[in-house]
Image (cartoon, grey):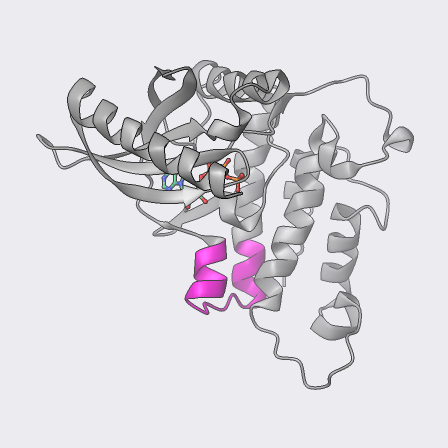
Amino acid sequence: MIFEYFSEKKYDRLVKGFVNNETPYNFIEEIGIGAYGVAYLLEDAASDKKYVLKRLKTKHRHKKKIRQKFDREIKILKETGLHHVPAIISHGKIQDIPFYIMDYIEGKTFEQAIFAEGKRFPLERSLQITKELLSIIKEFHKKGIVHRDLRIPNILLKGNTLYIIDFGLASYINEEIKYDKIINPKRTENHISDLYFIGHFLLFLLYSNYTPTIKKEKSWQEELQLPSAVVDYIERLLLIRPAFSSAEEAFNQIPEI
Ligand SMILES: Nc1ncnc2c1ncn2[C@@H]1O[C@H](COP(=O)(O)OP(=O)(O)OP(=O)(O)O)[C@@H](O)[C@H]1O
């Protein structure tokens, strides 16, 4: 653990030196550490425009599969031209650690909004955000990409516009998958994974309004007291009821309240 900490810290200094000496940008600070990567904020001194450098964690440098995933993340960002995703500017290696530089989204993640700022999302607003998210995701699927990690730290809100980051688990859609053979919906290489995550995302938004009144935990259906059309809808996203056949169908059927 301690060795790992020092190894990452040493690498932070290498990134700082690289950015300040070999790119047009200034190194500002570290902004995020995840399971696989570290993200830093950079600034272009000439224009004040901000960028993010994301690199693989040093502890994963010799893991072939993880390196391949990082390469796939870069490939997907470079080749697919997805909208509502930070544009990739450049990529390379710093002492054998792969990295890429992308636009900085000056917004906040839903994790920050809900847990750090205590922001509440009423039902109507939650459904509206989910509809916007689905309209972005159905375009990803049309381009053959499934994100597979649509969690609250990976969805950002800038003003009223949503952005999706962290394509570390993204994959190309596999058309052969049979619905009745899905064991782990989160990791499925088709629309089911993104819709399943969106079901949980919507529950996070709705729980931002909920204050428990009794100690005993109940199911979300009992606790949230939602209109039955909304319960049915979420149950389809979460595969408690028959799945939607596409993100397009889920988008078209979002309940009006
Ligand atoms: N383009 C960006 N604009 C603004 N903030 C960003 C951007 N990219 C990353 N971040 C911030 O850095 C954090 C970590 O980035 P990212 O999720 O891509 O890394 P990760 O190591 O793959 O994370 P995890 O392992 O948790 O999935 C994000 O939660 C977000 O707060």
Up/down of 218 relative to 111, above or below:
below
Name the quadrant containing residue 22: top left
177 vs 134, nearest the viewer: 177
Q: For residue 19: magenta?
A: no
Residue at image position (86%, 35%) is 183
**Is the stretch drawn in magenta largely helix, strand or loop?**
helix
In magenta, the rendered stretch is 111-128
Q: Is residue 215 left or right of residue 204?
A: right
Q: Is residue 16 left or right of residue 61?
A: left
Query: Residue at the location (55% across, 39% down)?
Result: 35
Residue lying farthest left?
46
Q: Is residue 225 visible?
A: no
Q: Position of residue 136 (x, y in %)?
A: 52, 36
Residue 17 percent across, percent down from the top left: 22, 27
Q: Quadrant of ligand 1?
A: top left
Q: At 76% from the left edge and 18% from the top edge, which residue is drawn?
A: 175
Across and down, in percent, residue 117 comes to 41, 66
What count of labels does the image hold? 0
Query: Which image quadrant: the C terminus?
Result: bottom right
